[in-house]
Amino acid sequence: MSRKLQSVASYEQFVTHLLANFPEEEALSIAVGGNYEQIGVYEHALLREHGLKPNQLVVDIGCGSGRLAWQLRRYPYLRYVGTDPVPALVDYARRKVERPDFQFLVETGNGIPVADGSADLIVFFSVFTHLLPEESYAYLESAWQALRPGGKVIFSFLEFTVPVNWPIFQNCVAWARSTGRAGHLNLFLHRSDLRIWAERLGFNVAAMLYGDQPIVTVDAESATQRVPAGRYPLGQSLCVLRKPAPGEPVQPAAVQREA
């Protein structure tokens, strides 16, 4: 069994354990990291800030139990496709959001299940943090194919230069030291490498933001009673890549090697 399939199986076991020990709503909030409403509001706000329009096609890879979809359900003409490898999460998201026109799919591969050139926004929140680099790169290749010209990929990532991410790495080290084997994968990416990826894939970098800074602007439209308007840190850093329009050049990565 591949490492990826093992990670999916262990995640399914984790979700099953949560469902056996907590009420469904609480269990499937814990399964995606908790703070269901808060993080959903943040993700919605980030999409609005980076070009969300109410009639677009949004693809949410790693949609989990529907945090983002729950916030996006307010847009009657929005087209939405969410995917996740865990059936229980997909089923809950479908039931909770109650939008028959929203698609929720169980997917374990690196493809984007929409027609080429059709998507406006493709998002990966807390997805590349748990994949090997080559798996994340394969997803970005698929995203480039699925996006319309001018469309954007938005993804969060962990990096060592953000102090609040460091304890995650320390916990991984402690686990490896105490057990002698790797635990749940938490992968750190370097923004200089992401710029090289963007150039090789044919994207332009629209934004690269540090997760410990107030990079989330919750406006009146995305705010809720529990999450008021304001500026907030996301925790994970954020990368926004844009597929160039026809004839628009791809900007070089501008990353210099040290002597």
Image (spheres, rainbow, N blue to C red):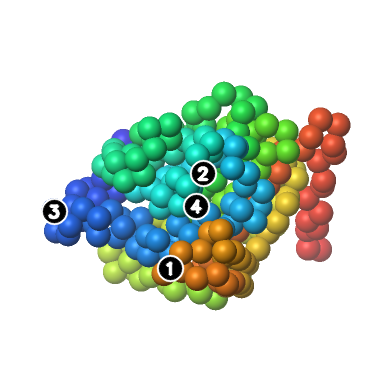
The local crowd at label 1, few if under 14, some if 14 to 19, many if 20 or more residues have their Cα within 10 Å, is few
Sooner in the amino-acid sequence: mark 3 or mark 2: 3
Image vertical order of residue 109 relative to residue 157, above or below = above
Q: Which amino acid does label 4 sit on?
A: Phe
Single out the mark in the foreground, 4 or 2: 2
Image vertical order of residue 68 relative to residue 159, above or below = above
The residues bearing labels 4 and 2 have C-alpha atoms spaced at a distance of 20 Å
Whether the residues at callouts 2 and 1 have beta carbons within 8 Å, the answer is no
Sooner in the amino-acid sequence: mark 4 or mark 2: 2
Label 1: which residue? 225
Given residues 238 and 187, the one toward you in this image is 238
Label 2: which residue? 75
Label 3: which residue? 20
The local crowd at label 2, few if under 14, some if 14 to 19, many if 20 or more residues have their Cα within 10 Å, is few
> Where, quadrant-wise, is the C terminus in this rendering?
bottom right
Disc 1 element: loop
What residue do we see at 35% from left, 63% from top? Answer: 34
Using the rendered image of the protein, determine whether residue 206 is visible from the camera's viewpoint: yes
The local crowd at label 3, few if under 14, some if 14 to 19, many if 20 or more residues have their Cα within 10 Å, is few
What residue do we see at 78% from left, 50% from top? Answer: 253
Disc 2 element: loop
Q: Which amino acid does label 3 sit on?
A: Ala
- Point out residue 125 in the picture as x, y percentages from the top left corner: 50, 52
Using the rendered image of the protein, determine whether residue 188 is visible from the camera's viewpoint: no
Single out the mark in the foreground, 3 or 1: 1
Whether the residues at callouts 4 and 1 have beta carbons within 8 Å, the answer is no
> Where, quadrant-wise, is the N terminus in this rendering?
top left
